[in-house]
Image (cartoon, rainbow, N blue to C red):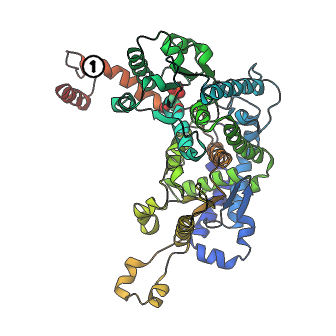
Amino acid sequence: MPYPVAGESPRDTPQWSALAQHAKEIKQTDLRRLFAQDPHRLDWSTLEVGPLYLDLSKNLITQESLRLLLGLAEARYLPEAIGAMLRGEHINVSEDRAVLHTALRHGATIAGPIDGIDVDHEVELVLSHMEEFVRSVRSNLRVGVTGKPFETIVNIGIGGSDLGPEMVTMALQDFSDPNRSMHFVSNIDPVAIGSIFKTCDPETTLFVVVSKTFGTLETLTNATAARQWLSQALADHPGAIEKHFVAVSTNEALVREFGIDPQNMFGFWDFIGGRYSVDSAVGLSIMLAIGPERFRSFLHGFAAIDEHLREAPLSENAPVLLGLLAVWYRNFFGAQSQAVLPYSERLARFPAYLQQLTMESNGKSVRLDGTTVDYGTGAIYWGEPGTDGQHAFYQLLHQGTILVPADFILFGEPLGGPDPQQDLLFANGLAQTRALAFGRNEEELEALGVPAALRPARRMPGNRPTTTIVAQRLTPEVLGALIALYEHSVFTQGVIWGINSFDQWGVELGKELASELVPTLSSPSVPTLDTLDASTIELVSRYRHMR
Ligand code: F6P
């Protein structure tokens, strides 16, 4: 049967029932025993993919668990689904679109044009346009209207048009041009754009307005405020807006209407979802920061994982295995959340980036044909860099009453050159995975001389699953590979659940209601129960008194 497997519940497959039965057995054992019973555990539970090493051994699995999970993947036609995505079939059914972020990095080849577009060629054209622009800015050939080089880049966007550029620019700041400062404005809170006006010099500021639709309220409001600020400040210099504003969008008409020259617009396509767009023209600010060569390395990182997704058998396919583990914990252990814990200061925004990628993708409760799911789907992703998290929320991970599977991301080499502090960072990450997996039992506490009365509080149950991902150093290539790993894990989960990981209708209603409420806040007439609910009427009236 071809993809999609719409309408069928994965619960109705024999593989699901077998997994449910198997999970009961796994719950009777623990990681100490699993490690002791299988001296070859690492042989089947670790893998190297591109620049990444993955250790799945501290998960609550045996070889049998993997065999059964892989059976479920086959039963849900995962290989067919991967093929359908890479071939550009319209797997985003509610928007009737292809899903082609893999085409941005040329890793997984696509034969022929898709929807009448020669995708490879178009991707390359946009990349060349970006490179030409970035080189001219970085070499100070392209300057502001008063002839001064651009020292400040302000990216205005939200969601996928902000999180990716911001997270990557922060992560790769050690590879960035030290002569330019990067800022990201997303929130409609006036404080956000206001701080740009307070600290930046209009003569040396370049605004990159990023919006797939060019219709997003927050982005257009902030961009309009920026346009006003700049045109006032540079009122004596005609043509300031053309020089100081560029756009990244799929909507040329609206970009033109805003006053940005379409020659200064960098395009992408409907088949690139916002949360999958960091490696498209949406990454223009990243390229401005790190330069075209490093941006290409970033793309190579993605491509390595794309090729791996396409070529590796399911049993050795890293993103597939990560996705299956997510399903394992979500559906058979009742886990509601997944922690992502990068042992890297530079990856501080990585969990926030993953929140959009994972939760906007798999926060769904109907299948592709509109039938309602009768099982859990997307988990809550969250996290903070270690070691800060250790001193905040790890207590609950160790001794709390809920199961939170966690991904630990560790690096061998510090970014600033050899440093003994890196040993401390790495050791801390490793120690946490050990404590979570193996805990500390009654006998060990006794051997340590802990009085019996204190032992319950100090007992560490262990048996808390973790995956460890290790890379040499946080380079552009490694970061690209990491992102692609999660992108394809998300897809794997969505396929198992039979949901559409590429639409996001759930965020639309709030946007609509906000536009309806804006005039109400300043209207002289009192809203009534015919138009609003009692709670909202009261809150509106309180707001009116405060404003
Ligand atoms: O919040 C919904 C959403 O559509 C995201 O999917 C998207 O990344 C974000 O808004 C921004 O949209 P745009 O790039 O069109 O401004």
Mark 1 CB near ligand 1 (8 Å cut): no
Left or right: residue 94 versus residue 519 is right
Extreme residue toward the right, this view:
111
To which residue does mark 1 refer? 520
Look at the picture and state if 285 lies above or below 14: above
Q: Quadrant of residue 416?
A: bottom right
Whether residue 103 can be seen here: yes
- Quarter of the image with the N terminus is top right
Look at the picture and state if 233 lies above or below 321: above
Q: Nearest the camera: 31 or 142?
A: 142
Q: Nearest the camera: 215 or 510?
A: 215
Q: Residue at x 64, y 51 (%)?
A: 323
Give the percent coordinates (x, y) of residue 127: 69, 28
Give the percent coordinates (x, y) of residue 133: 64, 24
Q: Residue at x 42, y 22 (%)?
A: 226
Give the percent coordinates (x, y) of residue 459: 43, 78
Give the percent coordinates (x, y) of residue 148: 51, 23
Q: Quadrant of residue 280?
A: top right
Q: Callout 1, which amino acid?
A: Thr
Task: Give the structural element (helix, strand or loop) at label 1.
Answer: helix
Q: Residue at x 49, y 79 (%)?
A: 440
Q: Nearest the camera: 81 or 56?
A: 56
Look at the picture and state if 190 lies above or below 386: above
Look at the picture and state if 56 lies above or below 497: below
- Quarter of the image with the C terminus is top left
Left or right: residue 318 versus residue 204 is right
Left or right: residue 41 versus residue 349 is right
Whether residue 530 can be seen here: no
Q: Quadrant of residue 402?
A: bottom left
Left or right: residue 308 versus residue 364 is right
